[in-house]
Amino acid sequence: MAPSSLGAGDGGRGRREGSLPPCPADPPVYECLVCRRFGSESLDALQRHLGARRWLAEAAWRESAGEAYHCRICRYRTGLRANFQLHLRTEKHAHNYQLAAHLASGGIPLPPGALHPGNPLHVRCNLCRFQTTSRQQLDLHVAGSWHQ
């Protein structure tokens, strides 16, 4: 290889200019692993993101045909409209609905009946690679001496 083809400042290692892959941007300190579209240097911003109210189009999760009512998020079915309306007011449905909407905001398709009350929230601290399913655990991690 002719010396004129070496990149300036390559230390004589023989690399051509532009042959090195670009350095990726530093990842944010805190990252939402639910939607995988949010990251921040601020814990408060992550907490606001996690607590934000989200909405889904009714057709994406609710189905009714004649006397049958079906919640695709929770896999709940009933023949009585009153029971379906009661289901929509339960904490289980509210939790599953918000999780489904959060997933959808990240472009993640929702498989029918994939959610149940135990499906956790996931967040990560990229400084320490700490992952948790709880906002409270993340707060404790940040306040602890092991978070650098």
Image: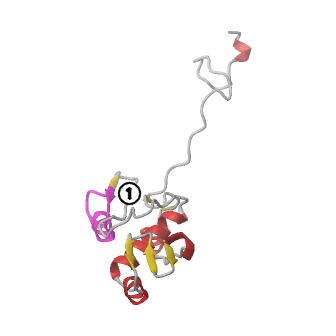
Q: Which colour scheme is used?
A: secondary structure
Residue found at the very far right of the displayed protein: 4
Q: Write down the residue under mark 1.
A: 125
Q: Where residue 40 appears, x then y in whole percent?
A: 49, 63
For the residue carrying disc 1, how many other residues have a C-alpha within 10 Å: few (<14), some (14-19), or many (20+)? many
Q: Where 24 falls versus 29 (above or below)?
A: above
Q: Nearer the viewer, residue 35 or 13?
A: 35
**Quadrant assignment, res 72:** bottom left
141 falls in the magenta region: yes
> What's the amino acid at mark 1?
Cys
Give the residue displayed 46% in from the left and 82% down from the top: 67
Task: Give the magenta-colored segment's residue range.
Answer: 131-148
Question: In front: 4, or 35?
Answer: 35
Quadrant where the C terminus is found in the figure = bottom left
Counting from the top left corner in percent of width and height, residue 86 is at 37, 87
Eyeballing the image, is 118 above or below 89? Answer: above
Residue at 40%, 90% (x, y): give it.
Answer: 82
| Residue occupying the point 52% across, 64% down | 104
Number of dots carrying numbers: 1
